[in-house]
Image (spheres, rainbow, N blue to C red):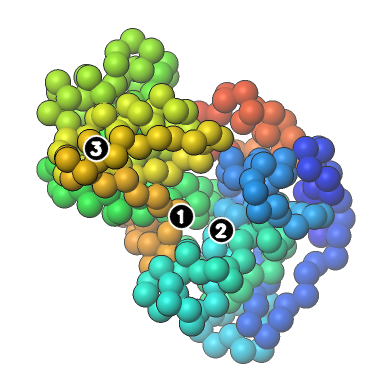
């Protein structure tokens, strides 16, 4: 099969022909139709994070396709099922976190395109317990970004505990943020989007943001306080220190700041104000299988759709270059098989 592989951190990926992976008793083999490109894939290929991925590595954790082979112990899936292989490739299933519905915190978890090979390939083996079915109403290309960017922002909004009719601010209207805006609108929240540039401001308005703030023209936290008296929740997808500080200052008393982006530097939290104002600062990482099913249903109902550019696997190095330069508006999805 054809696959994009990295053998050494920060080198270019190579398109190689490699054997189709073997299927274990609890595995399924998925013929990949499409795979989204996430910034995490770039971090993996550069070895940016303290816990390094395996090498050589086939990246990709937004892979979607059809099951073509079942392991001997799989009883609840069938050949031909349309599924996705998310970042949470597997978890132990029996620790306190898994039993408490917090499987993304499992210390024994495996991650697709990081600790195990992912979906930048024509075929990918997956743990049959952790693939999630794709609703018939959603195409492979449309579904791919929802298996990371979609579920990450949807889960973050759940963690923010913002009720319908209340205010939420989305800092960053890019690949993650433009989906967060749509989920927030669909969940009945009043949305303030923060980013810069006419294109992103226009997209945020089109997606339903009530107010759009260009941080190069206005002070976001001051503007938010004047418009809404502070927001009940913030989802910060941005990775800059300034964005974090503004996100915190945008909250009203009792508000919740949910952190999604992974900045390279430390971010100080004003403890006095946090205690006095009853503010919560929460980290949120991807989502569970249940979160995935819920976020996919929003797409099936026509309420959420990623802004997508479709490109072939052979252009992955060019895609990474665009990502480094910040030139991608929305999400890139690579098609691996015939269009559906």
Q: Inspect this view and state whether residue 25 appears.
A: yes
* Rendered location of residue 43, percent (x, y): 65, 42
117 versus 316 height, above or below: below
Mark 1 → mark 3, Cα distance in angstroms: 30 Å
2 and 1 marks in contact (CB < 8 Å): yes
Q: For mark 3, give the secondary structure.
A: helix
Q: For mark 2, give the secondary structure.
A: loop
Mark 2 → mark 1, Cα distance in angstroms: 8 Å
Question: To which residue does mark 2 refer?
Answer: 87
Mark 2 → mark 3, Cα distance in angstroms: 36 Å
In the figure, residue 11 lies in which quadrant? top right
In the image: residue 160, left or right of residue 103: left
Question: To which residue does mark 3 refer?
Answer: 272
* Rendered location of residue 157, percent (x, y): 30, 49
Of 59 and 235, the residue lying toward us: 235
What's the residue at 62%, 23% (across, down)? Answer: 325
Q: Earlier in the sequence, mark 2 or mark 1?
A: 2
In the image: residue 339, left or right of residue 155: right
Q: Residue 286 carries which label?
A: 1
* Rendered location of residue 237, percent (x, y): 42, 37
- For label 2, the crowd category at 10 Å Cα-Cα, with few meaning under 14, some 14 to 19 and many 20 or more, is many
Q: Which of marks 1 and 3 is nearer the N terminus?
A: 3
132 versus 271 height, above or below: below
In the figure, residue 121 lies in which quadrant? bottom right
Of 44 and 37, the residue lying toward us: 44
Q: Earlier in the sequence, mark 2 or mark 3?
A: 2
Q: Residue 334 carries which label?
A: none
Q: Which residue lies furthest to the front in this view?
A: 272
């Amino acid at each position: 099969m054809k696959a994009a592989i990295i053998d050494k951190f920060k080198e270019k990926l190579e398109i190689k022909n490699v054997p189709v992976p073997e299927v274990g008793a609890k595995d399924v083999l998925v013929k990949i139709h499409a795979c989204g490109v996430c910034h995490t894939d770039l971090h993996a290929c550069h070895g940016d994070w303290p816990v390094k991925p395996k090498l050589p590595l086939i990246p990709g954790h937004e892979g979607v396709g059809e099951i073509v082979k079942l392991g001997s112990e799989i009883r609840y899936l069938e050949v031909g099922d349309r599924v996705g292989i998310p970042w949470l490739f597997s978890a132990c299933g029996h620790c306190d976190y898994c039993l408490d519905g917090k499987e993304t915190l499992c210390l024994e978890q495996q991650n697709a395109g990081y600790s195990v090979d992912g979906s930048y390939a024509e075929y990918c083996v997956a743990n049959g317990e952790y693939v999630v079915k794709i609703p018939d109403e959603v195409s492979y290309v449309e579904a791919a970004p929802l298996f990371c960017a979609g579920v990450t922002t949807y889960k973050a909004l759940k963690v923010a505990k913002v009720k319908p009719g209340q205010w939420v601010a989305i800092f960053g209207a890019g690949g993650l943020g433009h989906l967060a805006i749509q989920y927030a609108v669909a969940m009945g929240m009043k949305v303030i989007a923060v980013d810069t540039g006419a294109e992103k401001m226009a997209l945020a308005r089109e997606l339903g943001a009530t107010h759009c703030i260009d941080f190069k023209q206005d002070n976001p936290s001051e503007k938010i306080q004047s418009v809404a008296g502070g927001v009940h929740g913030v989802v910060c997808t941005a990775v800059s220190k300034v964005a974090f500080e503004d996100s915190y200052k945008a909250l009203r008393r009792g508000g919740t700041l949910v952190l999604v982006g992974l900045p390279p530097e430390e971010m100080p939290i004003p403890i006095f104000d946090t205690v006095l104002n009853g503010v919560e600062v929460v980290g949120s990482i991807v989502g569970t299988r249940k979160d995935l099913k819920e976020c996919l249903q929003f797409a099936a109902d026509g309420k959420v759709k990623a802004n997508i550019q479709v490109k072939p696997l052979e252009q992955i190095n060019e895609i990474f270059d665009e990502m480094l330069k910040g030139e991608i508006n929305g999400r890139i999805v690579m098609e691996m098989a015939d269009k559906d």
